[in-house]
Image (tube, rainbow, N blue to C red):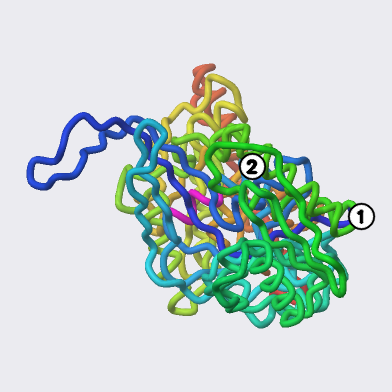
Amino acid sequence: MTGPVVVLGDTLLDRDVEGVVNRLCPDSPVPVLEETTHVDRPGGAGLAAVFAAAQGAEVALVTAVADDAGGARLGTLLAAAGVQLYALPLAGATPEKIRLRARGRVLLRHDRGGPAGEPGEPSEAVLRLLATASAVLVSDYGRGVARHPALRAALAATRAPVVWDPHPRGPAAVPGVSLATPNESEARELAKAPPGASRLVTASRGAQALRRRWQAGAVAVTLGGDGALLCHAGSTPLVVPAPAAEGDTCGAGDRFAAAATLALAGGALVSEAVQEAVAEASAYVADGGVAAALPAPVRTAAPALMVGGGDRIGAAAAGEVVSRVRAAGGTVVATGGCFDLLHAGHVATLQAARQLGDCLVVCLNSDASVAGLKGPERPVVPQGDRGRLLAALGCVDAVLIFDEPTPRAALSWLRPDIWVKGGDYASGGGAETLPEAEILARWGGHTVVVPYLDGRSTTDMIAAARAGRGRPAATGRARETVVRSTAEGAR
């Protein structure tokens, strides 16, 4: 593989709520589910990307993410799974699918998020990504990403093999895809196959009709537990049977499409890719489905982007600020750090950062994150107090607490126009040395460095206090402002 495997499409937030039912509701004859645990995971294109990453591939996901708590949760889950997120702005709310379960059975599915919002424009980094991919999987869930004109043009131009997993509410595949992977009902609906024929005949007719209409190299119709039927141009259909498997089939289609895409990226023939995909999907169902297949960090139920602690603290507060500023055409600025023992140097950096745009969101390391970075004796001030102190500053519009060692997941969701670091990074030779520069480039953002005050250091303050020396002296001289951009032509 020369470049990453790219998954492009609509991502949802899936949640499985497990509980017990011991009684009926007193005012209506329905069961009362008492929740015992819940598990969040990326759904749709996000799930396909997680499956591909779990196989060891370098995976980038191009999808639309809303400025809300659901979008923040998705960013965290995808980062934990090792998926590089290239997020498009999304108007509206993050779509969510919530399954209420008892004893392994689904009692009810609750969908929320409303009608599909309009995805924003892709950055130059997204278009370059599609041009250099080793393979592309379009995982269409009918919410608009696969319909975007700029993305469709880039897909049509790429030399990489393209696998198209369609949706009845979605657009036609771009001409020339290597493989389309509808299931039986999708093929029947998309091809408008007449009723009355046998199952295999109906699948074959639907596949051939779609192959001609979409000018696709091949179409594989998935047949659930019976495998898949593959149609090439002018050839007899190939039936790929599946080993016997019973279990939860949720996500099996995404597993099939992801496995076929990885096989094509590795140089397999289409027929070989379909056979490998059938084997992978069957093993996935037999092994327990989505509950057993995802890496452990993705299945954690605790939110990694903290919510609560004040009206200006948490994912909901940050999302509201960012949405309002974006709607008005403003500039979103973000910065981050531990901010243990808030001091004048911190305040100077925050004030300078706020002047660069129309809002400032501070990404704050949680207590666990600080301890991992600086040792078990830190932080001195707990995250709740640190968040409240920052939120009380007039230059700070929202505080987002994150649990990881770096703010990569938070940045993937916030997508700030400008990311700010204190001036001590300037000595490294330029903003290109900032660790966040690569991720900001995904949506055309800039990284900059602003002044800091000499002599202010949390570590020195703590050491001085423990030694009984009082605060360290400060020169009071602000260093020269250094502002550089990772984006060509930025000022």
Residue 349 % position (x, y): 55, 53
Mark 1 residue type: Gly
For this rendering, which residue is in front, 176 or 458?
176
Above-or-below relation of 23 to 433: above
- Residue annotated with mark 1: 267
Whichever of labels 1 and 2 marks the residue nearer the N terminus, that label is 2
- Residue annotated with mark 2: 81
Residue 68 % position (x, y): 42, 59
Residues tagged 1 and 2 counted as in contact (Cβ below 8 A): no
Above-or-below relation of 302 to 147: above
For this rendering, which residue is in front, 121 or 203?
203
Q: Is residue 472 visible to the viewer in this orientation of the structure?
A: no
For this rendering, which residue is in front, 481 or 299?
299
Q: Which residues are magenta?
A: 70-75
Structural distance between the alpha carbons of marks 1 and 2: 25 Å
Instruction: Name the residue rendered at 44%, 76% in the picture.
Output: 327
Horizontal arrangement in the rendering, residue 455 relative to residue 314 (left or right): right
The image quadrant that residue 413 belongs to is: bottom right
Instruction: Name the residue rendered at 45%, 61% in the picture.
Output: 94
Q: Is residue 409 visible to the viewer in this orientation of the structure?
A: yes
Horizontal arrangement in the rendering, residue 421 relative to residue 400 (left or right): right
Instruction: Name the residue rendered at 68%, 67% in the picture.
Output: 201
Q: Secondary structure at mark 2?
A: loop
Residue 284 % position (x, y): 65, 39
- Dominant secondary-structure state across the stretch colored magenta: helix
From the viewer's perspective, is the residue at label 1 or at label 2 nearer?
Answer: 1
Mark 2 residue type: Ala
Give yes or no for residue 365 being in the magenta stretch: no
Above-or-below relation of 408 to 331: above
